[in-house]
């Protein structure tokens, strides 16, 4: 690929990092987390035994050791970052005496050229923020054998809003002249570590979270659940989802090939629940598709503003404040705590704009995280 600024790869390779490691000192706990994820995705452990698996973007291989423990007959792991490749190879070798079923391949997912097809394709934390995630998804979906499964992650501007606001905060906190990553981390760590401490179930080191979410340039597009379903609609049906928010109360005898509509039903369910991705601490009643669309369109604008180069001028800050205020007005009234966190964030931006001493200590905002990325599994029609 002749793309000069490739999301993830250029930043990771330039700094020699793979900032996605996990604390797996309690291996049983790590395996239980992964088993819970696969369960939500509708993937029984026995499905993997004896199957051909492709993982795209294994990162540091922490998740791969669980997948390999399920005994795939062939396990191909493709990554375009040198450090990721080395760590994945080392971690597999450390945890298994025989890894002759595993092949770790260096390459860019956009160029991966093979005639091989796989029973299971995994692509976690890698599609959203690619330049064209839908094209990338279409491409990797061709590697799934008929009847096989693909598991991907999706992020939309609603589930990512709290992170986008942290990114805006980062732009205000980092002076332009500070280019060195260790100095940047020294400035950001005391601000964001307390936020992450409130996050239940976190397993990634703080510095790596900052590198990946705040220092990495945001170059591409997000991929929502709806985008992913539309992209694969011709040959795949949605199967599982994590968080597990979709239900289907139909009598199975009423479902046939003409009435199944798994994909359109999932999109409708997603639209009615999109506000539930805003804040992981709460689950609210469903809302109308129109209310969901209004929330989404405001968050899309915030995404585009947050993507712009760091070092916002005061005029840009006013623009951001205006959009955040509009967003605040469409947050469902039941989401009072989320609205309170957003109001506090808006107030702090206003102080910054007025040139007042700007404190990043935001007690209502700090514990607010969205439902980040969601996992979606699809089955390829036979
Ligand atoms: C954010 S990390 C996710 C790692 C791991 N799957 C996880 O969920 O913890 C993204 C991974 O995908 C790899 N990656 C990103 N873009 C890629 C591309 N175009 N081709 C191949 N690998 C890519 C990165 O090197 C990195 O290992």
Image: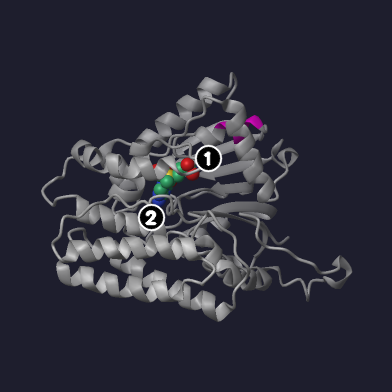
- Image coordinates of residue 186 in percent, x first then y, are 23, 37
Classify residue 185 by image quadrant: top left
- Image coordinates of residue 217 in percent, x first then y, are 28, 53
* Residue 26 visible in the picture: yes
Q: Residues within 10 Å of mark 1 (few under 14, many from 20)?
A: few
Q: Are marks 1 and 2 in contact (CB under 8 Å)?
A: no
Q: Mainly helix, strand or loop, the magenta region?
A: helix
- Image coordinates of residue 89 in percent, x first then y, are 47, 28
Which residue, given by chain and number where applicable, does mark 1 sit on? Answer: 201
Residue shown at 50%/64% (left/top)? 224
Residue shown at 22%/61% (left/top)? 309
Classify residue 28 by image quadrant: top right
The numbered mark, 1 or 2, whose residue comes first in the sequence reads: 1
Label 1 sits on a secondary structure element that is loop
* Screen quadrant of the N terminus: bottom left
Which residue, given by chain and number where applicable, does mark 2 sit on? Answer: 365
């Amino acid at each position: 690929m002749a793309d000069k600024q490739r999301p993830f790869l250029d930043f990771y390779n330039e700094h020699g990092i793979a900032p996605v490691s996990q604390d797996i000192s309690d291996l049983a706990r790590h395996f239980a987390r992964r088993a819970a994820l696969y369960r939500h995705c509708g993937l029984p452990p026995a499905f993997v035994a004896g199957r051909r698996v492709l993982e795209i973007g294994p990162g540091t291989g922490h998740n791969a050791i669980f997948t390999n423990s399920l005994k795939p007959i062939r396990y191909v792991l493709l990554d375009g970052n040198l450090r990721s490749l080395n760590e994945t190879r080392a971690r597999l070798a450390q945890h298994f005496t025989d890894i002759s079923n595993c092949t770790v391949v260096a390459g860019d997912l956009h160029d991966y050229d093979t005639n091989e097809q796989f029973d299971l394709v995994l692509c976690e934390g890698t599609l959203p923020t690619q330049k064209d995630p839908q094209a990338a998804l279409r491409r990797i979906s061709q590697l799934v054998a008929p009847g096989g499964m693909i598991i991907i992650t999706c992020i939309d501007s609603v589930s990512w809003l709290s992170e986008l606001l942290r990114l805006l905060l980062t732009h205000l906190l980092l002076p332009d002249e500070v280019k060195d990553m260790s100095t940047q981390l020294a400035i950001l760590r005391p601000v964001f570590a307390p936020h992450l401490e409130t996050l239940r179930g976190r397993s990634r080191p703080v510095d790596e979270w900052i590198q990946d979410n705040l220092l990495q340039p945001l170059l591409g597009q997000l991929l929502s659940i709806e985008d992913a379903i539309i992209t694969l609609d011709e040959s795949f049906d949605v199967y599982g989802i994590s968080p597990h928010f979709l239900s289907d109360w139909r009598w199975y005898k009423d479902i046939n090939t003409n009435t199944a509509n798994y994909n359109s039903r999932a999109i409708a369910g997603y639209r009615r629940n999109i506000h539930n991705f805003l804040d992981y601490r709460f689950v609210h009643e469903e809302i109308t598709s129109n209310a969901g669309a209004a929330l989404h369109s405001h968050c899309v604008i915030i995404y585009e503003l947050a993507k712009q180069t760091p070092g916002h001028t005061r005029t840009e800050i006013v623009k951001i404040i205006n959009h955040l205020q509009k967003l605040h007005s469409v947050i469902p009234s039941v989401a009072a705590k989320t609205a309170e966190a957003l109001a506090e964030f808006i107030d702090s931006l206003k102080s910054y704009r007025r040139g007042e001493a700007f404190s990043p200590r935001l007690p209502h905002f700090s514990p607010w995280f969205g439902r980040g990325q969601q996992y979606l599994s699809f089955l390829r029609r036979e």
